[in-house]
Amino acid sequence: MKARYQYRFYPTDQQRTSLAQLFGCVRVVWNDALALCKQSQKLPSNGDLQKLVLTQAKKTESREWLSGVASIALQQSVADLGTAYKNYFDSLKGKRKGKKLGSPRFKKKTNQQSARLTRGGFSIQKETVYLAKIGNVTPIWSRELPYLASSVTIIKDCANRYFLSFVVDIEPVSLDTKNQNIGIDLGIKTFAVMSNGEKAESPSYKKLDRKVRKLQKKLARQQKESKRRNKTRLKIAKKHNEIADIRKDFLHKLSTKVVSENQTIVLEDLNVSGMVKNRKLSRVISFQGWREFRTQCTAKSQKYGREFVVINRWEPTSQVCSECGYKWGKLDLKIRSVQCLNCRTEHDRDENAAKNINKVGIGHCHDSKCTSRRSKTIPVVSVNEA
């Protein structure tokens, strides 16, 4: 299986200029190839696009400066466009899982910039990495590369930070487990409630979010394409990156802990796109990163040889007693604890849901439904009789 290892590096002033030229050439080649694809009735092949936007374009005066950067990065830009179109058509036909993808878009100078190099365009020499026509850069090696990288992507984000992202082929690792299975209920105040009673509190983003809102109001009042507006834009990008780094660190630590300690991990399929339409909760839900947590658990389960299960979103996990299976129906979000009418057991709402998620994930759903039907036949004292 393939994995990514990302490291930050600090280029010199000369390397910054060379990287800016590389990013600009990659962006122009992508936009030129995309414009040709939109104009033509039939999608051209990668070979035809490379001839038009690279081989023939370098001979013209308007694009002769494309020869000043590594040709591998330009060829990979055309290949990435072909992959983007393939994913788009597969999504339309239903061959690709997940939500529908849009058609490829033109790249902008103010967005995140990237350029990909294959093995012919880079080499790792002890602590430095040589990049074609850029020179040697020294990334911060926070961890070792397990194997030889097949490609590297040079990234410059909106806050002017530089990263090297290596693609490496790794082999699954087997680890001993403490628990056989675990169910996880994701929430807002408490990010995750486990079926074994453990809870994971999500970090607070209120202070950083308040600063972002203040800077966005300031940005809206400033003149477009002015230097002060550009400074404010960079400040906003840095705050957004700070929020993203805090969230990513929390999710990585939690997903690693969950996957390394349990053999089977069960999650609920949440309709996040529908939940975000609630204008009162949309901002808080967007900060949580439920989808990212699910993606990380999926990848790490494959790495460590675990079983990852996602149950149907229509399972009534918060409407059924986890002890006897009695179904009490829908509850308001304000109600955080429930007492079962059948077995008189008092449940915490989230813990009960996590236990039911675990039961459904390991295949005990049928037993709970049978118990639920039997329990519904038991008479309950009405309010008037009480």
Image (cartoon, grey):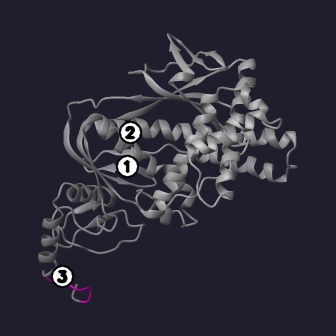
Within 10 Å of disc 3 (Cα), the crowding (few <14, some 14-19, many 20+) is few
x and y percentages locating residue 199 in the rendered image: 35, 46
**Residue 321, above or below 310:** below
Q: Which residue is mark 3?
A: 380
Which numbered disc flags the more N-terminal residue, 3 or 2? 2
Dot 3 and dot 2 residues touching (CB under 8 Å): no
At mark 3, the secondary structure is: loop
The quadrant in which the N terminus is found is: top left
x and y percentages locating residue 27 in the rendered image: 69, 40
Q: Nearer the viewer, mark 3 or mark 2?
A: 2
Dot 1 and dot 2 residues touching (CB under 8 Å): yes
Q: Nearer the viewer, residue 309 or 64?
A: 64
Q: Nearer the viewer, mark 1 or mark 3?
A: 1
x and y percentages locating residue 222 in the rendered image: 85, 49
Which numbered disc flags the more N-terminal residue, 1 or 3? 1
The magenta segment is: 379-384
Which numbered disc flags the more N-terminal residue, 1 or 2? 1
Within 10 Å of disc 1 (Cα), the crowding (few <14, some 14-19, many 20+) is many
Disc 3 and disc 2: Cα gap in Å? Answer: 43 Å
Q: Amino acid at mark 2?
A: Leu
Left or right: residue 82 versus residue 209 is left
Q: Which residue is mark 2?
A: 254
Number of dots carrying numbers: 3
Q: Amino acid at mark 1?
A: Ala
Q: Which residue is mark 1?
A: 192
Disc 1 and disc 2: Cα gap in Å? Answer: 9 Å
